[in-house]
Image (tube, coloured by chain):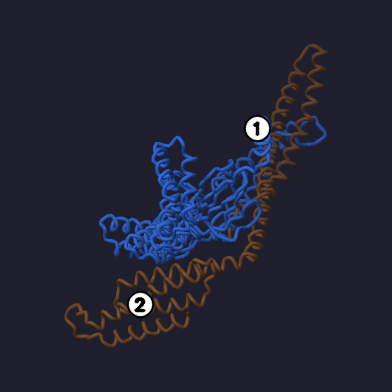
Chain colours: A brown, B blue
Amino acid sequence: MRAWVLSLLLASGVIAAAQQAQEAPAAPAVPEVTATDKAAHALMQDTLVEAERWLLEYFIQPGTDVPSVVLKDFEKLDTAVQESYFRDLAQRSGMLLFVTREEVRLVQERRKAAETTQRLLRESLVNRRRERRRRTTATLFWTSLGTAIAGFAGSYGCWYLSDYLDQRYLSTASSQQAALFKAWSELLQSASYASAGIGVVGITIALPALAGMRSRPTSR
Amino acid sequence: MALILLFSALCYAQDAPPSPGVLFLSSSPINAQVIHNGEPLALETPLLLRDLAPGKHTFELRKQGYPARRVSIELAAGEVKAQVFDLTGGSFQPAFLNETDLVLAGKPEKTAGVLFQLPEGDYRVRRKGEALVVEPRYRWQGAINGLNISLPLALAFSGLLTVYDLLTPPDGPLPLSAATLSSYGLTAGLAGFDLVLHLKRRSFRKAYSYSVTPLQESPHVARELYDRAEGLLAQDRREEALHFYGLVLHEHRDSVYLPQALFKSAKIHFLTEDDTLAILEFQLLVNRYPLQDLYDKAEKSLADLYARQGDYQESLAHLDAMVFADPLYSREDIDLYRCEVLAQWTAADPAQHPALLEAWRALVERYPGSPRAQEYRQRLDQLQGGGG
């Protein structure tokens, strides 16, 4: 069957070449359609119709894989049609080529499925890990930054209150109240140092977390 | 007896597997790879997934140059669902057709007939002499600007507190108060952030990339070609319409208009009675580009074409493959059409008469409340009378 289609292809190629040779350069208007042209057109149309039927009956309908050699044959046929001046057949030939190319691609996709599967799974796993890491780093960054801000704010607040209570301790007349102010002042002073420490720890964690933060991944 | 029958019916109902769901999965652009519940699928989008168990299904869509999308879809028993995912988020495609000189991210670029695919983000656009300069702006540039102001202020504030501590030494164990220490900690932290952000900005500028595609391949060109073909088809200029549908098919492989163009092309060939080519196109559409709004139409057209060619078995197989996602077709209409195809087949081959009878009987039993039920019963009676 392939040999038969190839002979048709050859015939169409010869006709296309003959047409090119016949083209008169000095022709003033649209070339007159001769009986030979009509025959050539009919032959080329029949070739296309037969090629379509051949593709349908031998490959598409039985669900057989379309081999890439068929695509090459149809590419030759398409070249012959495109080189002829039968523009009405060019669209048809282009469509046949498109359908064949897509069918061949389907076969190739199925053949490469195992390889593609492995690659996809690997990429998906890497992406998921990267996304998980990104989320963890972002959470760590914002949490530690929040802790640092709260720590420093607390430090300033405790320091201010401690200073205020220290002044009240100096100005108060009652010894009982003075002792209370002193105790609170010392407690708040310790708290302010502790808060400053928390702030420093927070900022120490936030800095490398910020450095390690990545943007969302894109498929390669 | 009735109780036993009811009990056995209930048992059967409990044991019977739930009817599977059907999902049309597509993406924009098409031809994205799909991972379903952790298992990669051999074919790319658009896809028709039959026999899906009811429940939650997870899909991951991946396409080169686009961010991956992960979604979960809940399917009920027997449900037919369609889902389209837009993968284009994360980038945009400007064209600078009126600019002669363009400097993009520090590189001079040609603007004629090209489209740029730039990553989403902030850009600074300004004119420098004749050239238009487009510079990507680092996401945290605002923070860097803020740090440039706050860092000297924090340093000055720390200095002031140090002076205060020197003049009035604190009571605590350290020569500096907690506020002063906090200020230095904060200043050091701000300086650290500034340094990290500067380093990240440098790596962002280094890693910044974009792609340039010919304008002819851009999605809007596919839409224009498709619209032009539609306009021509509306004027019944089929040959010219076919030319433009063909351009969409040949030059825009990833366009969402490709399946539509293929369907229209097949429909034109169907109308012009180029049956073989129409079958090839419809078959490609159902196998490779099944979309919710096209799939049933394509299957029905294939059934029509095969019936026209006298291949009734193939015609019925295509009617069976319909999933009724398209509201244009009801099950009753298609069952009735099945009877008509079988009637044609019986006319050609009288051996099909029992199958035809069975089809009419099924139609009468399935749709007793239909407005056409009386007509169905009459046809069945006629057939039963005629067939003896």
B372 vs B171: above or below? below
> Which image quadrant for residue A203?
top right
- Which residue is most to the front? B388
Residues at badges 1 and 2 in contact (C-beta under 8 Å)? Answer: no
Q: Nearer the viewer, mark 1 or mark 2?
A: 1
SS category of the residue bearing label 2: helix
Q: What is the chain letter for disc 2?
A: A
Do the dots labelled 1 and 2 sit on one chain? Answer: no
Which residue occupies the foreground of this view, A168 or A12?
A12
Name the residue at 46% across, 36% down: B368
The amino acid sitting under disc 1 is: Leu
Say whether residue B39 is left or right of residue B95: right
Where is residue B166 drawn, in percent x and y?
A: 73, 36
Name the residue at 44% across, 76% down: A74
Q: What is the chain letter for disc 1?
A: B
Where is residue B324 drawn, in percent x and y?
A: 48, 47
Residue B162, can we see it? no
SS category of the residue bearing label 1: helix
Circle 2 sits on which residue? Answer: A81
Circle 1 sits on which residue? Answer: B6
The amino acid sitting under disc 2 is: Val
Identify the image quadrant of the N terminus of chain B: top right
- Which residue is most to the left? A28
A38 vs B168: above or below? below
Which residue occupies the foreground of this view, B256 or B184?
B256
Name the residue at 67% across, 38% down: B14
For mark 2, does the 10 Å Cα neighbourhood hold few (<14), some (14 to 19), or many (20 or more) residues?
many
